[in-house]
Amino acid sequence: MKKSIVVRPLPLIINLLISLGGGTLIGLLTSKNNIAENYVAPSFQPPAWVFIAVWTILYTLMAISFTRVMSNDDAKKIYYLQLVLNFLWPILFFKFELLTLSFIWIILLIVAVIIMIITFYKEDKLAGLLQIPYLIWLLVAAALNLGYVLLN
């Protein structure tokens, strides 16, 4: 018999505060750095408001997904690892404009997220599936990052 996953409100709220709060903090730390003004941007770069909307959705999905599997120690480890990698990438890319290092970093993040998806999926299928949009967006971000490397 399959166990039932119960998402308790307090852990969900805490996880939302961590993911959305961290994302907001990173946004504030990097908001004055408009990399598109200093470099040639890839032609497929979306407008800034798209990033804000997408990341809000993704951080919410991340928190919900993690709350479903947070009793699993392996899930905790990979979730927090990818979260640290995620929060540091914009600093490398926007704040320090380390385009090549940022590209390598986002590849590491993608690998961590793939491992996270597999780990979550083994514990709770929905938790793993909720991370797929995040992976897709990271692939778009990696393509943009690579575009900046190649164009500049």
Image (cartoon, grey):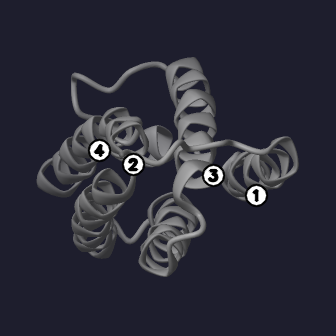
Indicate which label's residue lies in the foreground, 4 or 2. 2
Of the residues under marks 3 and 1, which one precedes in the sequence? 1
In the image, what residue type sits under mark 2? Asp
Give how far apart the Cα atoms at labels 4 and 1 are.
19 Å
Check contact, mark 3 vs mark 4: CB within 8 A.
no
Mark 4 burial class by Cα count in 10 Å: few <14, some 14-19, many 20+: some
Give how far apart the Cα atoms at labels 2 and 1 are.
21 Å
Check contact, mark 3 vs mark 1: CB within 8 A.
no
Of the residues under marks 4 and 2, which one precedes in the sequence? 2
Element class at badge 1: helix
Residue drawn at 22 percent across, 43 percent down: 139
Mark 2 burial class by Cα count in 10 Å: few <14, some 14-19, many 20+: many
Residue drawn at 53 percent across, 42 percent down: 4
Element class at badge 4: helix
**Quarter of the rendering containing residue 82:** bottom left
In the rendered image, the residue lying farthest to the right is 10
Q: List x then y, in percent, for residue 99.
A: 31, 65
Residue 101 appears left or right of 95: left
Give how far apart the Cα atoms at labels 3 and 4 are.
18 Å
Residue designated by label 2: 124
Residue 13 appears left or right of 107: right
Of the residues under marks 2 and 1, which one precedes in the sequence? 1
